Image (cartoon, grey):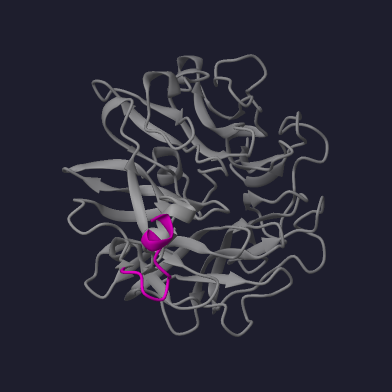
Amino acid sequence: MYAAAVLTLANAPTVMATAYTILDLGTLGGTNSSTLNAYSPVNGSGRVVGRSLLTGGASTHAFRTAPNAAMTAGDDLGTLGGTNSFAYGINASGQTVGNSQTTGNAGTHAFRTTASGKISDAGTDLGTLGGISLAYGIADTGETVGISFTSSGAEHAFRTTATGLITDAGADLGGLGGRDSAAYGINASGQVVGFGQIVSGSFHAFRTTAGGKISDAGTDLGTLGGTDSSAFAINASGQTVGVSLPATSQFNHAFRISGTGKLSDPGADLGTLGGTTSEAYAINGSGQTVGFSITAGNVGHAFFMDVTGPMQDLNDLIPTGSGWVLKEAHGINDIGQIAGFGTIGGQTHAFLLTPTPEPGVLGFAGVAAVGWLTRRRRVRSLFTSGRNQGGG
């Protein structure tokens, strides 16, 4: 009787599935929440970080969710004593980085929490080089990267040790010959990506060696032919994504290059969803890439790009009639979960997408065997910290 019930896959009925299910991450009581652009807001267990308005809307706090779960009150990470805080990156253990206003809102400092700790815990304040500081990325080792302004207003990229401060010797990563630099992403080996100002005044994407400086030979990744570029994320093999001005356009295009590649390489320009602009914010271990693009209809949508194939609008890959408009995708982990923000019910909310089975053959035998398994506008926000601090 059992044998008669088991269908061969060749004769089984097909089950069509959407590419992703979507989880509304909610808020900390206010009207909106979001992940933050160009960083690493989701880890391998499906924990997501970002920022949310609190009840009443007078302040914004960083959050860190439980795995694959919407926000609860306990996910509020607090502040360094000031009004607002923002979380940009999370590593495998749950350590979270970002920036917070300090007591009396006297300053804005980068922070790094413990795996389950709050921003207000002792030792989280990473200090500054004289002005404000912001932490954008964190490796699984705890090494942290970001930007600190000096007292003169210069912007310097930093990489701390796992337990170190921005002010420690060697944390300042230098630059590409100009005044300013910024670090956005770091991989497990300690390679760092971001942008540096060159002597001419333009900004170029860089990728350091493991433990190296921006000023080392070979770090300048060039551009897609235009004046400016910035790298936002790097995976374990050194593949790097970001944005650049092409030679023939005044609008940014997303790029993805190999672990040893430059932006001048064939295929580095990822194109757009039919509009003028695209920006790549994150890449996972296999090379899958997510970001933001203007569509042919002149609206901004989140995109997904597989290892091969064209850029896809993520709004085409979620259930029809969901009510969501996915605006930007900021992180993707190695099982393909994607974090970003969009609009739902007239509000902006952070989301987590989880891949579902691809369309194909899945009959009774398949179900019995596998169950329900799921498988600045020069370079848009690169050189101004306002959006990065404010989020979404």
Instruction: Indicate the quadrant where residue 314 lies.
Output: bottom left
Residue at the extreme front: 1
Residue 309, position in %: x, y? 47, 78
Question: Residue at the location (31% across, 69% down)?
Answer: 13
Height in image: 177 above or below 80?
below
Residue 234, position in %: x, y? 64, 58
**Depth check, front residue: 321 or 365:** 365
Q: Main secondary structure of the magenta part?
A: loop
Residue 324 falls left or right of residue 183 = left
**Count the marks: how many?**
0
Can residue 58 be seen here? yes
Residue 68 falls left or right of residue 183 = left
Height in image: 342 above or below 114?
below
Question: Residue at the location (38% across, 29% down)?
Answer: 71
Instruction: Indicate the quadrant where residue 219 lies.
Output: bottom right
Can residue 380 be seen here? no
**Depth check, front residue: 317 or 80:** 317
Residue 96 falls left or right of residue 25 = right
Quarter of the image with the N terminus in it: bottom left
Residue 185 falls left or right of residue 159 = left
Instruction: Indicate the quadrant where residue 328 lies.
Output: bottom left
Residue 311, position in %: x, y? 42, 73
Question: Residue at the location (82% across, 61% down)?
Answer: 216
Magenta segment includes 5: yes
Looking at the rendering, the stretch of residues picked out in magenta corresponds to 1-13
Question: Residue at the location (21% across, 45% down)?
Answer: 344
Residue 265, position in %: x, y? 64, 82
Height in image: 276 above or below 69?
below
Magenta segment includes 222: no
